[in-house]
Image (tube, rainbow, N blue to C red):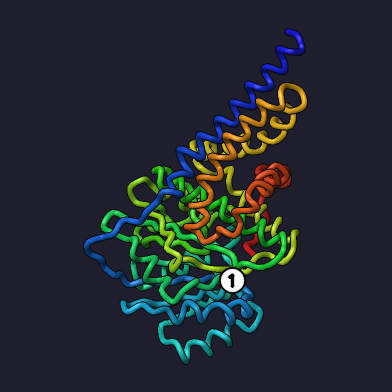
């Protein structure tokens, strides 16, 4: 083989990687862009138990818990806060809230669960203490976007639905880090929501997730992965979600909001914990997610190599086809998740995803730390 043959192979590999990317955009992500929630002729409200786990979260509870306590929901509901061995003023803060809000119940844990690191034991205690079949999960550092969060999330349930995947967004603030955090959050949601619409649900986020207690007990809670500190949301959904029992809810009234990490180091640690659970997903999910990530990681290096060593005109034509498909799919998807402000930045951040995967690749093989904080 001569040099021209190698250049030709380089171009074909670039085209193949681009084709993989186009496949994901048109087969998966386009589903979210075109998604319209179905209007139901009749609706039924369900009693709901909101569950929040907190460890030394007094400041966040003072700031965010009122958002869950003042929900406009006419049907019976409760808010359970699991105080997991806190050393701060959480106990006294919660006692103060209980005097005003009778629907608030506190589960106070005073001992660590041996052999069960992370959030799974306190969350299990909260689910076991719940009075109602439908549980709605969020975190202490999250606040519902509206006073209709409970109402909107429970609307997704019907006789076949056991799991509802919501969207946990971040407050919009100035700065590059905030934009990247919001993009990564949107990009993750684009995947798990689109996969669910394609009948292949693989994860949810604990900031905004609902399921029925029956599905929790059917799978014996988190027992299949109790030894892993993280994964109380994504690993459980990966195990329990099916095409028939899972729905998504992207009504803006059903969003939750969080403050984005304050530093690059804090964000990297947060994402490393998440990616450390990916290797425990089902093989089919690992293949689909891995193929997409690999194709995105390789796209821009191959684009640069094709421009330099093959033909810049053909390289830009292939790039342009992918870019147009991206542009058409991403804007309506961003608009649905109220992230359209990121649209002018998507090309620059998309290029930066090469470095993103480079940074977090080690998390796929690294042993997770035994802490959920």
Looking at the picture, how far across and down is residue 50, in whole percent?
43, 72
| Residue 350 x, y percent position in the rendering | 65, 45
User: Which residue lies under the disc numbered 1?
Assistant: 141
Residue 279 left/right relative to 135: right
- Residue 82 is situated, as x and y percent measured from the top left of the image, at 52, 74
**60 to 272, vertically: above or below:** below
| Residue closest to the eye, 321 or 224 | 321
Is residue 208 at least partly visible in the picture? yes
Q: Residue at x 37, y 52 (%)?
A: 246
**Residue 229 visible in this rendered orientation of the protein:** no
**Quadrant position of the C terminus in the picture:** bottom right
Q: Measuring 60% from the left and 74% from the top, which residue is drawn there?
A: 85
Q: Residues within 10 Å of mark 1 (few under 14, many from 20)?
A: many
User: Foreground residue, 130 or 354?
Assistant: 354
Residue 32 relative to residue 85: left or right: left
State the count of labels. Answer: 1
- Quadrant for the N terminus in the image: top right
Name, please, the residue furthest toward the top.
1
Q: Residue at x 52, y 53 (%)?
A: 189
Whether 4 is drawn above or below 103: the answer is above
- The secondary element bearing badge 1 is classed as loop
Question: 75 above or below 211?
Answer: below
Q: Nearer the viewer, residue 131 or 318?
A: 318
- Residue 253 in the image, given as x and y percentages of width and height: 43, 68
Q: In the image as oriented, which residue stretches furthest toward the front?
A: 313
Above-or-below relation of 262 to 163: below
Decide which of 258, 96 is in the foreground and name it: 258
* For residue 84, side relative to residue 366 (left or right): left
Q: Which image quadrant for residue 177?
A: bottom right
């Amino acid at each position: 083989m001569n040099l021209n043959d190698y250049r030709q192979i380089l171009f074909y590999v670039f085209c193949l990687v681009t084709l993989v990317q186009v496949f994901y955009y048109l087969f998966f992500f386009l589903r979210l862009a075109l998604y319209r929630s179905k209007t139901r002729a009749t609706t039924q409200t369900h009693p709901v138990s909101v569950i929040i786990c907190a460890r030394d979260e007094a400041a966040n509870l003072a700031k965010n818990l009122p958002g869950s306590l003042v929900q406009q929901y006419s049907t019976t509901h409760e808010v359970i806060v699991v105080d997991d061995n806190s050393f701060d003023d959480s106990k006294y803060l919660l006692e103060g809230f209980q005097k005003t809000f009778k629907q608030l119940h506190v589960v106070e844990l005073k001992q660590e669960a041996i052999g069960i690191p992370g959030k799974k034991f306190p969350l299990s205690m909260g689910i076991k203490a719940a009075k109602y079949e439908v549980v709605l999960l969020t975190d202490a550092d999250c606040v519902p976007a509206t006073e209709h969060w409970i109402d909107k999330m429970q609307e997704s349930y019907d006789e076949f639905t056991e799991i509802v995947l919501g969207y946990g967004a971040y407050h919009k603030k100035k700065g590059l880090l905030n934009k990247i955090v919001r993009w990564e959050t949107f990009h993750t949601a684009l995947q798990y929501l689109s996969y669910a619409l394609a009948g292949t649900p693989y994860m949810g986020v604990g900031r905004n997730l609902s399921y029925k207690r029956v599905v929790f007990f059917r799978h014996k809670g988190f027992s299949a992965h109790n030894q892993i500190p993280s994964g109380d949301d994504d690993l459980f959904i990966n195990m329990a979600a099916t095409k028939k029992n899972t729905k998504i809810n992207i009504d803006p009234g059903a969003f939750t909001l969080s403050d984005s990490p304050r530093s690059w180091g804090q964000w990297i640690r947060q994402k490393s914990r998440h990616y450390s659970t990916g290797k425990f997903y089902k093989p089919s999910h690992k293949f689909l997610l891995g193929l997409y990530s690999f194709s995105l990681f390789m796209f821009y290096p191959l684009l640069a190599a094709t421009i330099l060593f093959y033909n810049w005109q053909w390289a830009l034509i292939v790039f342009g086809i992918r870019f147009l498909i991206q542009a058409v799919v991403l804007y309506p998807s961003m608009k649905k998740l109220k992230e359209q402000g990121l649209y002018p930045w998507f090309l620059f951040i998309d290029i930066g995803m090469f470095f993103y995967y480079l940074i977090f690749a080690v998390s796929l093989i690294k042993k997770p730390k035994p802490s959920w904080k």
